[in-house]
Amino acid sequence: MKVLMVPLDDRPVTYLLPQLIARIAGCEAMMPPRNLMGSLKQSASLDAIFNWIDTALSTNKIEAVFICADTLIHGGLINSRRSSETYKELQARLNQIASWKKKAPQTPVFVQSSIMRISDNHDNVEEKEYWARYGREIFSWSTNLHRLANDRTMTQGVVKESEMRIPDAIRQDYLATRFRNFQINQNLIDMLKSGHFSRLIFSLDDSGEFGLNVLEQEKLNSRLKYSNLTERAFSYAGADEVLCSMFAHWLAQTKISAPPAAQVFYALPATEFCLSRYEGQSVGNSVRAQMKACGIKTVDADSGSNLSASFNVVIHGGENGQGDHMLLPGHQDLRAIDTREAVTATLAILEQSTMPCVLCDVAYANGADPLLIEKLLERPKLLAKLCGYAGWNTTGNTLGSALAMAVACWFKEFGQAQGSDSRSDTTQALKEAICIRLGDDWAYQTQVRKNLSAISVPHLQEQMRPYLRRIEEAMGSQFSYDNVSFPWQRAFEVEISKSGSRETQLSVN
């Protein structure tokens, strides 16, 4: 069974993880060659990608298409915020996407498009140059503009004061870029209505409670409601995980007569109401949105529901707020929070569960809870119960990717008659996915990264090796994961892949 995917860019979490999750389900995910994809400093090679898609659709039996519109329209997620291309140029690419309907009229097409983010920092690595000086000022101005639109009692003077902190030319450029991207998103709704897509996701990353991005989300939702499209379109906090979630939704809603169901367990009741960092909402709201995005029904044990759970969803988090392994200038230091009670509760839930569990580690943003992982590595039998794990970046990133793993496992078990490839080693694919997530989310983000003095691959590999060995042994993996690198030549993310059998590695070493 083959599906076609066009990811946001060439990062491991956007390019490699969706393919791995597809393997868990027994599917082959065809993607454009990685060297054609956008990166931190380079736009995607769009002509080559469109040609590749045309060829793939005409020479393969493709059961579904999943595309990140930011790539095919803007050249990548980062480029969507930086490029100076005109609306007319972008619209021409939309027309190319529309032409697929004639080439493969029966193939469902799932589309993700981002609502341009607004970061509350002075980091311009992923933004236009002026963000280094005016990033937080733009965030504040945007927040006040949205609040004014919703609150008639707010005075114009507050907005004017925040506006005057930003040069006029920068404000005009910023608004023009936003408006151009917003027009494209409105056009995508029109294409959904005309039948070019099966499902449309508007993703909202790096957001506060208020802002022009949230205001745009409200307007897009209103347009979807007016057009009676709310069953086929959805807007929520997330970005890098959405390709995985769209694939999971397709498996859950299209390939099986009854979708998967799950009971949600919060390690601590208060976790549900904690603020989810970078999302402007509670952890509980993020959980509900991501369950819906992945096509998973929620089993409410107290309501007498006749739904039978396919797996359990365990939400690991604290009670006094979410920690953060990243420390940004001007922000509170949350790199060490007390999670002892939550860890005890999470381990007890896993111990008592009689069915597979997907563990969503949201105690911290930008990495796993080190105390939880230390305890899990000491108890391999609990790790063996997992049908999914993640603990990276935002709550939405963690939830969407971990839940997609669980849906892929569920599909593999119940979807054989629907054409799933029984020859695929999906058990190994799941083990590989969890090993890589533990290696990235725990070993690198919480243990190694803080000790790095330079972007040096040999030093990275040396530092990572003992942690990766612990993970391999606890997971009972037959492979070693010694291929470690910096894919974007920065410390924010690493790429981990298997390098061969552990027996071979041991004999060599």
Image: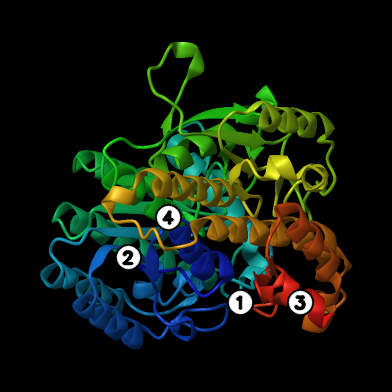
Circle 2 packing at 10 Å, graded few (<14), some (14-19), many (20+), is many
Instruction: Pick whichever of labels 4 and 2 is earlier in the sequence.
Output: 2
Q: Residue drawn 24% across and 75% down?
A: 60
Q: CA distance from mark 4 to mark 1?
A: 42 Å
Counting from the top left corner in percent of width and height, residue 31 is at 40, 74
Q: Amino acid at mark 4?
A: Ala
Instruction: Pick whichever of labels 2 and 3 is earlier in the sequence.
Output: 2
Q: Amino acid at mark 2?
A: Val
Disc 4 vs disc 1: which is toward the camera?
4
Q: Is residue 191 left or right of residue 267?
A: left
Q: Nearer the viewer, residue 133 or 224?
A: 224
Q: CA distance from mark 2 to mark 3?
A: 34 Å
Q: Amino acid at mark 1?
A: Glu
Q: Nearer the viewer, residue 168 or 484?
A: 484
Rendered-image quadrant of the C terminus: bottom right
Whether residue 89 is visible: yes
Instruction: Pick whichever of labels 4 and 1 is earlier in the sequence.
Output: 4
